[in-house]
Amino acid sequence: MYEGVVQDLIDELGRLPGIGPKGAQRIAFHLVAADAADVRRLAEVLLQVKEKIRFCEVCGNVAEEEQCRICRDPRRDPSVLCVVEEPKDVVAIERTREYRGRYHVLGGAISPIDGVGPDDLRVRELMERLADGAIQEVILATDPNLEGEATATYLARMLNPLGVRVSRLASGLPVGGDLEYADEITLGRAFEGRRLLDA
Amino acid sequence: MYEGVVQDLIDELGRLPGIGPKGAQRIAFHLVAADAADVRRLAEVLLQVKEKIRFCEVCGNVAEEEQCRICRDPRRDPSVLCVVEEPKDVVAIERTREYRGRYHVLGGAISPIDGVGPDDLRVRELMERLADGAIQEVILATDPNLEGEATATYLARMLNPLGVRVSRLASGLPVGGDLEYADEITLGRAFEGRRLLDA
């Protein structure tokens, strides 16, 4: 519908996740009217990301060097490993400031519908990291959905024979939430996982 | 929270309209994992837009030459002019295939709250286009909201003394909609604008 380059831009933007045709159009016209310097900065940072960013050779997180910031940090506890699906999960957990161990990023979750099996994830790399016995606990922090649960179950079965402690993040009512609005599954999990309160 | 360039990319993406912090993060990680060629194509089209796209010197629409495709098309009726706020409105109207006249893009609407007055829009250029008397009808197709109505009212007052026919797009119930779900103002407009049905 638009003249050449504007339509190209709308098409390219529309391929990004979470941007529909209307959103792509809106962003494209914003960019047409924006300062050339701003648009150039966006284009340059796009190119830099592909040049500079790689995945950490140890944990699979995004990194600007061979190893990511967390794997390079000697203050992080090497005996605890938290397994997550994606680099953004690392950021979410880091934000809590609760965890001082290390990470392992799988690069997704097991999903037969999407054709993703264990071999498509960094499972082999995980097993290799456990080989020397230095890791004493593995916390499975995959998403609390169908794929994440399946992945956690699969990994627990692989890890339990190794004698390492395997744990899973607690499911339950979100803090600040309203019991009345919780879905049945979450509420059921909250019952299952109830804790005794010592007087 | 992220290493250098990834955070830069999230920041730049977050400045685009309609992309929040979560969306920016999602797109950034999509791009980190995407083919380098795809990302390079997006970066290049961004740079091209700033190089190639300008605004049509006649109507203010986006154009790759001095004049846009519609202004260059000799088959378009030069006696009818449709006034819209933005280039995307031109595309929306073109999609109907109902209109064969020409356009005038204002570049926005009058909005005292945002500090946008008639001098910030292409109103002077509109008056100049009407000077030679070739245009017989001006259709005011600004948005059916507060700013669009104010702009249409302002323009109608400017144009009526010139003896040109001035019309406004009809307001009423959207086709395919449900009367029950229409808001009061739309329903009121639909009553006001009711048409006699000839038997």
Image (tube, coloured by chain):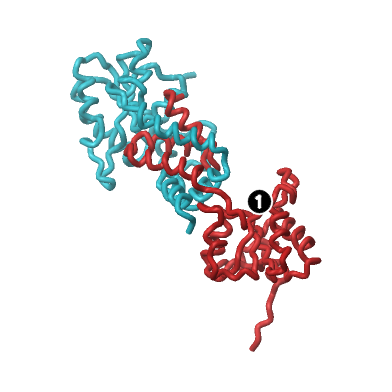
Chain colours: A cyan, B red
Q: Residue at x 69, y 50 (%)?
A: B121
- Where residue B74 sits, quadrant-wise, is bottom right
Q: A190 left or right of A125?
A: right
Q: A167 left or right of B78?
A: left
* Residue pointed to by mark 1: B108
* The residue positioned farthest toward the right in the image shown: B161
* The residue positioned farthest toward the bottom in the image shown: B199
**Residue A98 seen in the current view:** yes
Where residue A136 appears, as percent x and y from the top left, is 27, 16
Q: Residue at x 55, y 71 (%)?
A: B98
Q: Residue at x 60, y 71 (%)?
A: B77
Q: Pointer 1: residues within 10 angstroms few (<14), some, or many (20+)? A: many
Q: B138 left or right of B157?
A: left
- Closer-to-camera residue (B94/B133): B133
Location of residue B154 with respect to A176 vertically, above or below: below
Where residue A141 appears, as percent x and y from the top left, is 35, 29
Amino acid found under the numbered disc labelled 1: Gly
Q: Residue at x 40, y 33 (%)?
A: A47
* The residue positioned farthest toward the top in the image shown: A75
- Closer-to-camera residue (A44/A127): A44
Describe the element under mark 1 as helix, strand or loop. Answer: loop
Location of residue B40 with respect to B189 vertically, above or below: above
Q: B86 left or right of A7?
A: right
Where residue A7 appears, as percent x and y from the top left, is 46, 52
